[in-house]
Image (cartoon, helix red, strand yellow):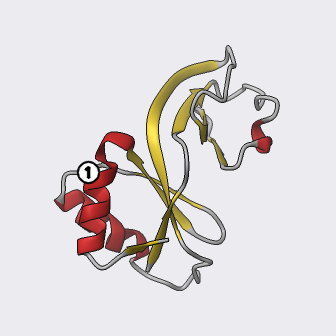
Amino acid sequence: MKLKIHKGLQAVYRLNPNSALPSGLFDKPFCCVTKTENELSIVCAEASLDDEAIQVCESGWKLIEVEGPLDFGLVGVLRSITTPLAEAGISVFALSTYDTDYLMIKDAKLQSAIKALTKAGFSFA
């Protein structure tokens, strides 16, 4: 399975669940929005949101994409990636879209993650 490391750094923002989406949000190359009754979470390029509604920002993430599209019937895709990372002591933030899965790893752990994933049989585009 091939993985692709996206350029730049990503951040995870938490906003009040009643906040409006920041303007220009969908102009970003990568953006993920999740809303629950307790929060509005936005993942996008680091330092790209300047919104007073931001409650917390966790920055410094590298985005890794599983080359897809992936069939919905596939089982264990995330497990196959997260197991070698967990064994190497690397935490992840996982996201999924209709076509594929994404993992975010702290930039400081990227080289260790590449090493662990390569050893587990993954290749990088």
* Point 29% across, 46% down: residue: 109
Query: Relative to residue 17, is residue 90 depicted above or below?
Result: below
Residue 59 located left or right of residue 115: right
Number of numbered discs visible in the structure rendering: 1
Other-residue count near label 1 (Cα within 10 Å), few / some / many at <14 / 14–19 / ≥20: some
Q: Which of 70 and 63 is in front in this view?
A: 63
x and y percentages locating residue 94 in the rendered image:
46, 55
Residue at (62% x, 78% y) in the render: 69
Provide the residue designation for mark 1: 90
The x and y percentages for residue 58 are 46, 30
At x 29% / y 71%, what residue is drawn?
A: 118
Q: What element carries label 1?
A: loop
Q: Is residue 81 positioned above or below 93 on the image?
A: below
Q: In which quarter of the image is residue 16?
A: top right
Amino acid type of the residue tagged 1 in the rendering:
Ile
Residue 1 coordinates in the image, percent (x, y): 43, 80
Residue 54 locus on image (x, y percent): 61, 21
Query: In the picture shown, does residue 50 fall above or below 108?
Result: above
> Considering depth in this image, is 123 or 51 the residue closer to the camera?
123
Side of 79 where 11 appears, left or right: right
User: Farthest residue in the top direction?
Assistant: 52
- Residue depicted at x 54% and y 54%: 6
Q: Is residue 76 above or below residue 117?
A: below
